[in-house]
Amino acid sequence: MKKCVYCKQGISDDRAVDVCDRCGKGVWGEKMFNAIKTNMDNAREKGNLLQGSVCADLQGNLKECSKEGTFKLTSS
């Protein structure tokens, strides 16, 4: 479970924004925070949040992250 960057309250792992609803609305206001959440969720679904990210496989080799931010292990 992820935590809000402001108050450290637990939030869902599948959330694109690391801010809880209470803090997000307090910082940006309800309308703007809802727009931020929607746009971040859409960007995550398209894979745009991982651009430039680098991940390491089990052997420590650096590679570009997949859309999910992980590597798929295949049997050889």
Image: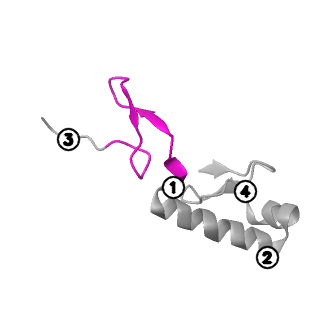
Q: Residues within 10 Å of mark 3 (few under 14, many from 20)?
A: few
> Could you say where residue 24 lies in the image, as x and y percent from the top left?
79, 62
Residue 33 among magenta residues: no
Q: Quadrant of residue 74?
A: top left
CA separation in Å, label 2 and label 3: 44 Å
Secondary structure under tag 4 reads: loop
Say if mark 1 contacts mark 4, CB within 8 Å. Answer: no
Q: Position of residue 25 (x, y in %)?
A: 82, 67
Q: In whole angstroms, how far apart are the C-alphas of marks 1 and 2?
A: 23 Å
| Camera-nearest label, 1 or 3 | 1
Of the numbered discs in the image, which one, if any, rests on residue 74?
Answer: 3
Q: Secondary structure at mark 3?
A: loop
| Above-or-below relation of 21 to 58 | below
Q: Nearer the viewer, residue 48 or 14?
A: 48
The amino acid pointed to by label 2 is Lys
Q: Residue at x 50, y 46 (%)?
A: 51
Say which residue label 2 marks.
31
**Distance in Å between CA atoms under marks 4 and 2:** 15 Å
Which circle marks residue 48 in the picture? 1
> Disc 1 or 4, which lies upstream in sequence?
4
Q: Is residue 61 left or right of residue 9?
A: left
> In the rendered structure, which segment of residues is drawn in magenta?
48-71
Residue linked to disc 4: 19
Q: CA distance from mark 1 to mark 3?
A: 25 Å
